[in-house]
Image: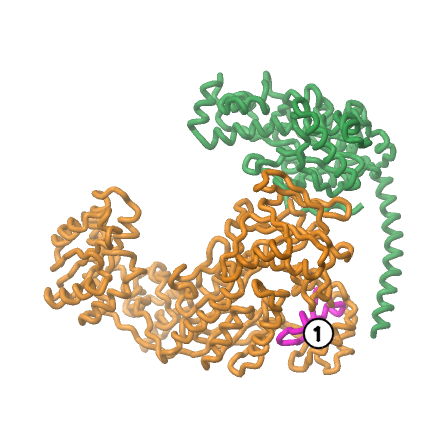
Chain colours: A green, B orange
């Protein structure tokens, strides 16, 4: 498999040391439908030595419904949580769910941009928020704070059968002025992180396409159509598995796959894993430990072929040797042809 | 001392927000001012007459005009007072338009500020000394940088006018972008057929000295007397022996060299002649791909060359040329397609740029004029053109229109239909910009006669689907999403300045804008001049431009050089640095800080070493005066005393 060429250099931690402690804002999804994301991400962060703790008494981030009603109120819901984190002495918060992340970042952005707005928000809070907390997605923490080298060091197992289409969804890197991370039109952070864990990554053109988001309830047909497109493009890209970083994307692609098959006449059976589950497996954890049993479409078949890094390296060496032999012959042939032209 | 002050209304430009009568009234109270008046348009002929008459009538010996920026009319008024018998440096301008009336709305504050500006000018003019310019000889040779169509036109016009021309081209052949085009809009005539004769003229003209595959290393001097260091890059082929037979290219075993002329549409050989009509038609080796350089053995070309022209030991050579004026015609580049990830540029082989498509269309291109998909070499039937690929997109820092993409896309769509009659072309556009002569008719023809389907809207994403490329965009006229399954996608990639444009500008001491294009002296009235006298612009280095505009500018720049060279002597500006040898301690700090190398050390008769300014080289920037620890080096017309007088006048109010 040809590994993808990355167009943009992202800033990443080269030292592999993470000193500080983070706030960990799980949000509602990670306690419910996306508990496997929570389980696996905790496992991964612990393995990489990232210290984190949940803020006491955290509340709803406001998500999508709040800002459709009132921007100040929405910001207050988010800022309450940021203020708790700030008070506990932490300056960075991990928000694994992109919806939470966007809302938290947006509150910070708008409050920083306008004193007037900040005053209105603070009026609604018990404790004023002093803008001292930066929100980062899980991918951002892994890339910028942990670094690819540290991830690579922790890899113990290789899954040669896995061919992953990394799927970012709509808001992980957008809007750019809010996300301040990765390329808004061609994100590569997940590709890089998975590649560092020696996972085969496909060049996936629909990494940003809409999954249908929350329209699964009011407009099921539309969501079926959209998820169909994403799934079929993943198959076309040569993937046998999709990696996600968003509970809603996961739900639409995984839970609705049967529904899509029924309405669109397709026969998809492609597992949709959180990137953290894949990392956990690469770090040597069992499927159970990364809550793989929570998936609707099972991934067991793809994980049967499981090698340790040593075994895999031996295999690669043998392959390289064979290739070298072949290459030598090619060069000899080439030189012959040169002589012929002379 | 009798100072006369003339305060201009400038119609309503100044009088609208400044009480000019009050300014005149206050000015009359300043000691030394013998006369102060206001005038509707001081720069007009009667306005200037008024100044001349007042000088005689009131016996004035210093003049202040409070009006616009000195950049506009300082020279006008200097000439006026010179005609009335005063030294032209007994004149000051107080800028009460750009610095006062245009930027403030409060009439009272504006008036106060205008009075202050006039007081400063009066204080300075009373300290002014008469200065006299000396004259120097002009070297009537001209350097043209860039051998594209603009540079060639400029070079030929200068040479036809009898001037000696040094033409420097960085690539191995002259011709520039136009030489790569297949046809030109709106006449659809063969590009190289109309450019070829010009290229031959450039090569054969006895007055033109061509340095191909050469770059400007260094520029020293000033208008009339430049010393240019030119780097002749190593070609590893002795061009005095090379006949351009092409035998080496045929036999070269390294077949995967990047072809810069064809924008990488297909590979070329490590030793190559860029195209059949190249001028000069000489081979050069690309050491990045040549086996002799990469592997240390090969030597095929050296063996095959009938004239023994190959020389692997060749090194870069520096030559010096002396000229009196410079025409900059360095052209443009195109945005790297990898900066458009949503279009898959650089990732999918069947998404190509307009210039690459031009090479596919061209009979002397790598496909001999057959349109084929780069991926599988099949003939495409559905072709989608995407205009504004990068242009007019603030998010990637290109807010401007690239000028000619609309037109070449229409041309390429027409040619596509000619090449493949059963093909269908689509054009995604934001606006069709076709304001030139015959241009709009041309784009209409593409739509009406050639059935090119124009879709108004931007493309959001291009992705592969099997062998096809799916182009997804909006049709804003229908208000729907469109998806077209194309065999080939052509991006009208944005025009950008050359990557080394800023570097070149610094060598030339000319300014460039935020996009890297060179800035003309005045956008309307001095379009080919720069703010550095002796340096002129032509073509797309000043901004995206099509062929007629580039040629027009080439000729315009040439005529400016002819006008400059019509005199035998030039007058130097006396406002330059001067050393007072009595106070100079010879520390020579000024020598190291002067950006123009205009100061050197001089030994006096008593053995003392002092700094010495070379009059003709000094540009009057004033860096040395602020460096000098003992105030020995002074910029004439801007001496410490003169500037302090201004500050004093301001502080005493």
Near mark 1 (Cα within 10 A), the count class, few <14, some 14-19 or many ≥20, is: some
Q: Position of residue B108 (x, y in %)?
A: 21, 43
**Please, which chain is the residue tagged with disc 1 on?**
B
Q: Give the residue drawn at x 78%, y 78%.
A: B303
Label 1, on which residue? B312
How many numbered marks, from 0 up? 1
Residue B135 in the image: x percent, y percent?
Answer: 32, 77
Q: Residue at x 68, y 74 (%)?
A: B283
B540 or B441, which is in the foreground?
B441
Say which quarter of the image contains residue B416.
bottom right
**Side of B458 relative to B88 (left or right):** right
Where residue B344 sits: x, y (%)?
A: 67, 47
- Give the secondary structure at mark 1: loop
Q: Chief secondary structure of the magenta span?
A: loop
What residue appears at the point 68 percent right and 27 percent down from the top-left corner? A248
Q: Would residue B249 be found to the left or right of residue B499 on screen? A: right
What is the magenta range? B270-293
């Amino acid at each position: 498999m040809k590994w993808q060429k990355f167009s943009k250099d992202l800033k990443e931690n080269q030292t592999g040391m993470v000193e500080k402690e983070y706030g960990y804002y799980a949000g509602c999804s990670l306690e419910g439908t996306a508990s496997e994301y929570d389980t696996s991400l905790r496992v991964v962060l612990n393995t990489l030595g990232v210290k984190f703790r949940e803020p006491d008494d955290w509340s709803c981030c406001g998500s999508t419904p709040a800002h459709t009603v009132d921007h100040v109120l929405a910001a207050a819901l988010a800022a309450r949580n940021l203020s708790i984190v700030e008070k506990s002495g932490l300056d960075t918060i991990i928000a694994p769910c992109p919806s939470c992340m966007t809302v938290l970042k947006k509150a910070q952005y708008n409050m920083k941009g306008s004193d007037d707005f900040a005053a209105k928000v603070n009026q609604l809070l018990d404790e004023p928020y002093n803008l001292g907390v930066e929100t980062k997605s899980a991918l951002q923490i892994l890339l910028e704070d942990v670094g690819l080298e540290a991830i690579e060091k922790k890899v113990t197992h290789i899954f040669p059968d896995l061919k992953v289409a990394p799927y970012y969804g709509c808001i992980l890197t957008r809007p750019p002025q809010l996300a301040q991370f990765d390329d808004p039109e061609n994100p590569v952070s997940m590709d890089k992180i998975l590649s560092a864990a020696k996972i085969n990554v496909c060049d996936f053109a629909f990494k940003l396409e809409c999954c249908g988001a929350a329209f699964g309830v009011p407009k099921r047909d539309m969501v079926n159509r959209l998820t169909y497109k994403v799934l079929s493009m993943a198959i076309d890209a040569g993937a046998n598995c999709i990696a996600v970083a968003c509970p809603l994307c996961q739900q639409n692609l995984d839970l609705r796959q049967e529904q899509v098959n029924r309405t669109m006449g397709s026969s998809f059976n492609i597992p949709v894993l959180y990137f953290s589950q894949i990392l956990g497996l690469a770090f040597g954890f069992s499927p159970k430990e990364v809550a793989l049993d929570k998936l609707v479409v099972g991934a067991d078949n793809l994980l049967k072929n499981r090698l340790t890094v040593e075994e895999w390296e031996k295999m690669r060496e043998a392959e390289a040797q064979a290739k070298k032999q072949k290459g030598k012959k090619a060069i000899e042939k080439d030189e012959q042809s040169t002589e012929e032209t002379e | 001392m009798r100072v006369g002050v003339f305060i201009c209304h400038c119609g309503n430009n100044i009088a609208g927000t400044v009480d000019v009568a009050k300014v005149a009234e206050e000015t009359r109270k300043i000691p030394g001012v013998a006369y102060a008046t206001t005038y509707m348009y001081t720069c007009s002929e009667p306005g200037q007459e008024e100044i001349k008459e007042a000088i005689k009538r009131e016996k004035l010996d210093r003049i202040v005009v409070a009006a616009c920026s000195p950049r506009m009319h300082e020279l006008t008024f200097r000439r006026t007072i010179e005609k009335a018998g005063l030294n032209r440096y007994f004149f000051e301008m107080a800028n009460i338009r750009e610095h006062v009336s245009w930027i403030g709305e409060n009439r009272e504050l504006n008036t106060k500020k205008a009075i202050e500006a006039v007081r400063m000018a009066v204080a300075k003019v009373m300290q002014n000394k008469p200065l006299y310019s000396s004259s120097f000889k002009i070297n009537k040779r001209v350097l043209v940088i860039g051998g594209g169509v603009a540079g060639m036109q400029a070079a030929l016009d200068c040479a036809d006018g009898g001037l000696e021309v040094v033409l420097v081209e960085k690539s191995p052949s002259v011709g520039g972008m136009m030489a790569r085009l297949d046809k030109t809009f709106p006449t659809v005539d063969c590009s190289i057929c109309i450019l070829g004769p010009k290229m031959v003229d450039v090569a054969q003209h006895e007055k033109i000295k061509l340095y191909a595959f050469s770059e400007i290393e260094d520029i020293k001097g000033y208008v009339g007397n430049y010393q240019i260091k030119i780097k002749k890059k190593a070609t590893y082929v002795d061009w005095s022996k090379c006949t351009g037979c092409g035998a080496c290219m045929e036999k070269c075993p390294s077949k995967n060299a990047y072809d810069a002329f064809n924008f990488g549409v297909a590979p070329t050989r490590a030793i190559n002649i860029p195209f059949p009509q190249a001028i000069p038609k000489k081979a050069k080796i690309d050491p990045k791909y040549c086996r002799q350089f990469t592997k240390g053995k090969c030597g095929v070309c050296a063996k095959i060359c009938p004239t023994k022209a190959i020389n692997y030991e060749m090194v870069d050579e520096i030559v010096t040329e002396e000229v009196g004026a410079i025409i900059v015609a360095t052209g443009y580049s195109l945005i790297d397609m990898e900066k458009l990830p949503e279009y898959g540029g650089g990732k999918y082989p069947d998404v190509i740029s307009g210039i690459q498509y031009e090479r596919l269309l061209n009979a002397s291109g790598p496909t001999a004029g057959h349109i084929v998909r780069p991926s599988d070499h099949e003939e495409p039937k559905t072709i989608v053109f995407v205009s504004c690929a990068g242009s007019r997109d603030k998010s990637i820092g290109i807010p401007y229109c690239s000028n000619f993409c609309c037109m070449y896309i229409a041309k390429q769509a027409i040619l596509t239909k000619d090449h493949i009659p059963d093909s269908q072309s689509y054009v995604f556009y934001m606006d069709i910009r076709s304001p030139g002569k015959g241009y709009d008719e041309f784009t209409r023809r593409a739509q009406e006669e050639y059935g090119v389907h124009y879709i108004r809207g931007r493309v959001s994403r291009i992705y592969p689907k099997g062998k096809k490329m799916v182009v997804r965009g909006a049709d804003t006229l229908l208000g729907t999403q469109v998806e077209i399954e194309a065999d080939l996608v052509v991006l009208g990639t944005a025009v950008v300045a050359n990557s080394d444009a800023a570097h070149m500008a610094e060598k030339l001491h000319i300014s460039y804008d935020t996009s890297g294009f060179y800035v003309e002296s005045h956008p309307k009235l001095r379009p080919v001049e720069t703010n550095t006298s002796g340096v002129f612009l032509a073509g797309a280095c000043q901004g995206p431009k099509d062929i007629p505009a580039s040629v027009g500018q080439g000729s315009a720049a040439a005529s400016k050089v002819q006008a400059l060279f019509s005199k035998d002597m030039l007058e130097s500006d006396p406002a330059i640095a001067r050393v007072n040898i009595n106070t100079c301690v010879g520390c020579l700090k000024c020598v190291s800080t002067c950006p123009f190398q205009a100061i050197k050390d001089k030994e006096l008769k008593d053995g003392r070493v002092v700094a010495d300014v070379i009059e003709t080289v000094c540009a009057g920037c004033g860096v040395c005066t602020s460096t000098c620890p003992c105030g020995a080096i002074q910029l004439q017309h801007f001496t410490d005393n003169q500037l302090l007088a201004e500050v004093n006048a301001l502080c005493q109010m």
